[in-house]
Amino acid sequence: MKKLFVTLVIIVVLVVAVSYIFIPTKIKISSIVTSTANSIGAHRILMNDETWAKWWPYEKAFQLEKTNFKLTKKMINSFEVMIYKGGDSIVSQLQLISVAIDTVSLLWSCELEAGNSPVKRLLYYNTAIAIKKNLAFLLDSLSAFVSDQKNIYGFRVKNVIVTDSVLISTRKLFNYYPDEFETEEMVKKMRAYIKANNAKEMNYPMLHIQQEDSIHFSAMTAIATDIKLPDNNEFAAKMLLKGGNLLEAEINGGHATFRKAFYEYDMFIKDYSKTSPAIPYQLMITDRTKERDTLKWVTKLCYPVF
């Protein structure tokens, strides 16, 4: 009996000693993961509350097993998130740390007040282990989400090389946003001009529509050719920097989709500190006058960059 009592005393002493030596009063918890994403773009989409539901790994956002979360504050490059586990509420911070132009580290951290009680310290230590596991799981899901450019900009961007060297173009002014029939008429005239000059088309037709003022829009169409064609009052030859850099993204949709996509493209250019030497344009893969379902329109958005 005496031996059992001594053994129990030793165990209690060891537990107390371990809790005081190895478990601090404040338990710091953190988890970090590195993603292939731009920190500015990733932060911008996380500013939208609806985005959190899209990357959250559980069906119901801000819940994970027996733990609840609440987004409480949005800051520059970070977010404050309350963690509710059991009867405790813990302030945590999700930080976005820019490592490179296309790399961001996601750091999620918090602190637990373990207090002086050895029993409480042991309990909070187990809580800390569970929270750290949850944060790591959430960060893996968030990392996968922001690493996909389509989740940030609505499309994926490829770096390609300009293969054409010359094109023929024409421009027309409208007092409204021109539709596919009007731009296709411009393309038909160019094709007739190319054929009349015994030249060959080298790529799909290009289109750039620009708003000049509150009511006027200018449309420019162009087609790459195998030889330089002569200018006249209607058509102008333009040189391309063959071998130059081009950002290319394929999308499906109609005019509203194009306009929104070019807005997002501008955001991409700013996020990645790109400089453009020429105007962006649509490469019209689908004949829009024959395919009336705009969801089936395939278009490549092209952005020349240095």
Image (spheres, rainbow, N blue to C red):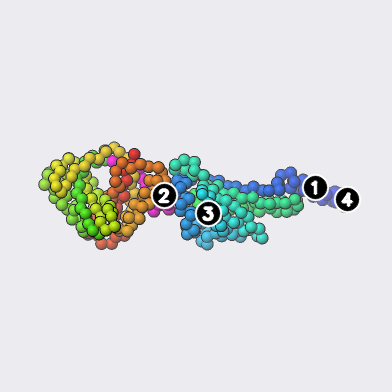
In this orientation, which residue lies closer to the viewer: 160 or 261? 261
Residue at the farthest left position:
196
Residue 230: x and y, percent? Answer: 14, 42
> Which disc, if any, is residue 2?
4
- What is the spatial separation of the Cα atoms under label 2 and label 3, in whole angstroms? 22 Å
> Which disc, if any, is residue 74?
3
- Earlier residue among tags 2 and 4: 4
Label 2 sits on residue: 149
Q: Tag 2, which secondary structure?
A: helix
Q: Nearer the viewer, mark 3 or mark 1?
A: 3
The residue depicted at 50 percent of the width and 57 percent of the height is: 52
Label 1 sits on residue: 13
Residue at the farthest right position:
2
Q: Which of marks 2 and 3 is in front?
A: 3
- What is the spatial separation of the Cα atoms under label 3 and label 1, in whole angstroms? 46 Å
> Mark 3 packing: few (<14 Cα in 10 Å), some, or many (20+)?
some
Q: Tag 1, which secondary structure?
A: helix
Magenta part of the protein: which range?
149-162
- What is the spatial separation of the Cα atoms under label 1 and label 2, in whole angstroms? 55 Å
Q: Can residue 197 be seen in this view?
A: yes
Q: Image quarter for residue 232? A: top left
